[in-house]
Amino acid sequence: MDRIGRLIKELVPQRPRRRRFYVYSSLALAVMLAAWLFSALPPNASQAQSGWLMAFISKFLGVEVGELLLRKLAHFTEYLVLGTFMGLGITQLGWRERSFLVALGLALPAAVIDETIQVFSGRGPSIIDVWIDVAGAAAGLLITRLFAGRRPDKRRTAA
């Protein structure tokens, strides 16, 4: 663990940026754990949760949403938030050419684990959901990249 701390200090030398990196990384981890907890719900609890959300959307937005669409949107949205926090963490390190791919490389196994957990909770895993998850993470990363912008890396410009 000490090696990881030293590596982060080398990558993120400024203390405020390092703090933000830890915050965004912790939020990304929390989102990932929440997604896994939702996947661990048994089928009846998951269905009740979907039913509650469908009723809420129908009542307040006046739009009828089918359960399948709602579930797919939930997958996309969970990983959109995960990708956004990952992207915000990356902005503290400074974007590199491969930052996007590394982040997606972390999101893919998270999505696979997410679906694998459903096997043990009596629900059916889906490879389509894995790709929806990865697409959500990619969208979050892209949104962060667009809005966070490419700020010049002070370490590179100082040299």
Image (spheres, grey):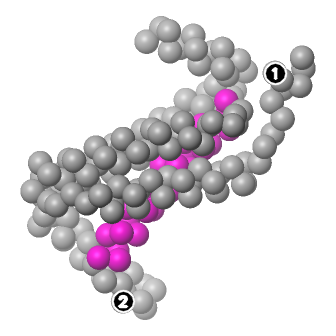
User: Is 86 part of what is drawn in magenta?
Assistant: yes
23 vs 67, left or right, is right
Q: Residues within 10 Å of mark 2 (few under 14, many from 20)?
A: few
User: Is 82 part of what is drawn in magenta?
Assistant: yes
Q: What residue is at 35 percent from the left and 77 percent from the top?
A: 69
| Residue extent of the magenta highlight | 68-93
Q: Amino acid at mark 2?
A: Glu
Residue 155, numbered circle: 1
Q: Position of residue 72 (x, y in %)?
A: 36, 69
Q: Secondary structure at mark 2?
A: loop
Q: Amino acid at mark 1?
A: Arg
The reply to whether residue 134 is visible in this rendering is yes
Residue 64, numbered circle: 2
87 vs 30, left or right, is right
Q: Quadrant of residue 12?
A: top right
The reply to whether residue 34 is visible in this rendering is no
Specify the quadrant that holds the C terminus.
Answer: top right
Q: Quadrant of residue 88?
A: top right
